[in-house]
Amino acid sequence: MPKDASWDAASGKFSWAEGELAVPPGFSYLPDWGTDTFVGRFTSRDGQVVISHDIGRHADTWARRDQQAIAFRETVVDGARVWVVRRDLSGGPAGRVSNFAVTFPDSGCANFYMESARPEDGQAIEFMARSFRPKGHRAAGCAGLGQ
């Protein structure tokens, strides 16, 4: 993990240079490195729910309004934007599947996202979005947003 990131399994608190949030109880964490971003994943105790993250200026914006978005919400926490989206990815052989994501475009372009056939699994993303707190300075926005 980058030196400015941390994970506390006991409290469920995940922190990076520009923000912090809580992960629902019972999740484990595995960090990784992307090509030019910090990535990792949180996995529920039963392995049924996997939430990935992609953090960095070059990260794509996972939560945004687009043609597949069936719900989009923007809020502001202490001056930092929070975008939450649900997309319908139905049409495949697995049946109805949704993508749930939260992006913090003003806080290091941090994205947390998952896919699930169970709508109730999206509550994990909502939990994370509600618990978010920005830290210190505001980093440049996400790639492709012109910020």
Image (spheres, rainbow, N blue to C red):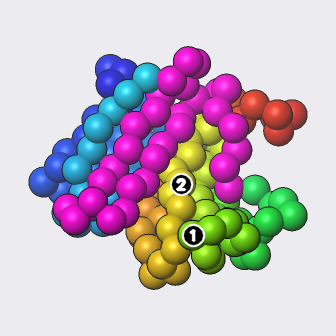
Identify the residue at image location x=56%, y=18%.
35
Graded by Cα atoms within 10 Å as few (under 14), some (14 to 19) or many (20 or more), the crowding at tag 2 reads many
Whole-percent x, y for residue 31 in the image:
33, 32
| Image height of 19 relative to 84, above or below | above
SS for callout 1 = loop
Residue 113, disc = 2
Amino acid at dot 2 = Tyr
Identify the residue at image location x=53%, y=54%.
113
Residue 9 visible to an observer of this rendering? yes
Magenta stretch prevailing secondary structure: loop
Q: Residue furthest bottom?
A: 120
SS for callout 2 = strand
Residue 78 visible to an observer of this rendering? no
Amino acid at dot 1 = Ala
Q: Which residues are magenta?
A: 34-63
Graded by Cα atoms within 10 Å as few (under 14), some (14 to 19) or many (20 or more), the crowding at tag 1 reads few
Residue 94, disc = 1
